[in-house]
Image (spheres, rainbow, N blue to C red):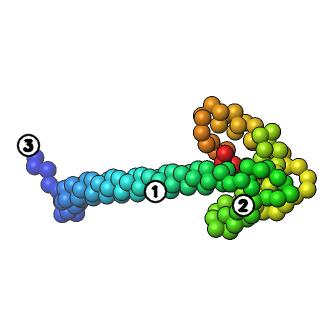
Amino acid sequence: MSKLRLSIVTKLALLVLAVGLPLSGILAWSIQGQFRSERTAAEQYAVSITTAMATRAEVTVDQTRSVLREIVKRPAVQAMDRLHCDPILRDLRQLIPQYANINTFNLQWEFVCSAVRPISGGIICSACLELSEKMKAADGMVMSTPVRGQLTGRLVVIAH
């Protein structure tokens, strides 16, 4: 039997493969571990952001509910007099600038007053009738999906 003789280049190539393949595996395993770690960190960050946003939304809804409860108690608001709007509507809009506007509507959903500016024509609250039905079913405050405000032109959420 003849003995297989390998050249020095072949022996070096085999040595590089013998060392390089396990190192490549270790490197791939390390990269995969780093990827998993970063993905886990990103997921935890996303959860914390989502939790913070949900908490902020809950606080905003609670504050809005409180503001609306106090506004409806005021005699000038209850009077539903278009010629004598309660000035608190304008004041509240200045105090709470995240509100695009504060409007009052009567039980027939006819526009009465606005914090932005008084108007002579009628405003149609297209989302109000649907919200009214939802509010009756929910027995409490409901909020619309974002709609374009007719007085402000801004995207607004109607709460009542």
How far across and how far down the image is residue 51, in percent? 44, 52
Q: How much space separates mark 3 and mark 1, taking CA atoms?
A: 77 Å
The quadrant in which the C terminus is found is top right
Q: Nearer the viewer, mark 2 or mark 3?
A: 2
Among the two numbered marks 2 and 1 on one chain, the one whose residue lies closer to the N terminus = 1
Q: How much space separates mark 2 and mark 3, taking CA atoms?
A: 105 Å
Question: In the image, what residue occupies the spot 8% across and 43% down?
Answer: 1
Q: Specify the farthest residue to the right.
A: 121
Q: How much space separates mark 2 and mark 1, taking CA atoms?
A: 30 Å
Front in this rendered view, residue 34 or 117: 117
Among the two numbered marks 3 and 1 on one chain, the one whose residue lies closer to the N terminus = 3
Residue indicated by mark 2: 89
Among the two numbered marks 2 and 3 on one chain, the one whose residue lies closer to the N terminus = 3
Q: Nearer the viewer, mark 2 or mark 1?
A: 2
Please state which amino acid type lies under the numbered disc 2: Leu
SS assignment at label 2: helix
How far across and how far down the image is residue 37, in percent? 32, 56
Front in this rendered view, residue 95 or 47: 95
Please state which amino acid type lies under the numbered disc 1: Ala
Residue indicated by mark 1: 52
Vertical placement of 135 versus 26: above or below?
A: above
